[in-house]
Amino acid sequence: MATIKRNYNMTDITDKWVKLRGNGNLYASESEYIRALIIRDMEQHSEIEAIRAAIAQGEQSGMSAKTPEDIKQAVLKRKHLL
């Protein structure tokens, strides 16, 4: 994948943090640290959207005839805990 050079303005505090994290043991460079943050944000966004879609689907499905105990048992069975 091609890389594109970007320039961003940061506060002194933010700049110090990026330099600290980007030049440490976890990340080889400041750019690698920034890329990791963006990737993590993208993953979190995808997870949030999946949760929102599941909530919407649940709301549209209406009320369940199952009791709370029925639901609990189904979850435990699905997770192989029974």
Image (cartoon, helix red, strand yellow):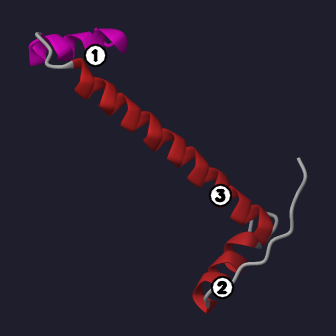
Is 51 or 40 nearer to us in this picture?
A: 51
Label 3 residue SS: helix
> At x 65% / y 57%, what residue is drawn?
38
Amino acid type, mark 1? Val
Whether pointer 3 and pointer 2 mark residues with C-beta atoms closer than 8 Å, the reply is no
**Residue bearing the label numbered 3:** 38
Whether pointer 3 and pointer 1 mark residues with C-beta atoms closer than 8 Å, the reply is no
Give the number of the mark in front: 3 or 2. 3
Q: Is residue 67 magenta?
A: yes
Real-space Cα distance between discs 3 and 2? 18 Å
Q: Is residue 60 above or below residue 6?
A: above
Q: Position of residue 24 (x, y in %)?
A: 74, 70
Q: Is residue 38 left or right of residue 4?
A: left
The range drawn in magenta is: 66-82
> At x 68% / y 76%, what residue is drawn?
18
**Residue bearing the label numbered 1:** 75
Res 16 label: 2
In terms of sequence position, does the residue under pointer 3 or pointer 2 come before the other?
Answer: 2
Res 6 label: none
Is 11 or 61 nearer to us in this picture?
A: 61
Is 82 or 37 nearer to us in this picture?
A: 37
Amino acid type, mark 2? Lys
Name the residue furthest front: 60
Amino acid type, mark 3? Ile
Q: Is residue 48 left or right of residue 18?
A: left
Whether residue 26 can be seen here: no
Query: The C terminus appears in which quarter of the rendering?
Result: top left
Q: Is residue 58 above or below residue 5?
A: above
> At x 11% / y 14%, what residue is drawn?
69
Q: Position of residue 29 (x, y in %)?
A: 81, 68
Q: Position of residue 41 (x, y in %)?
A: 57, 54
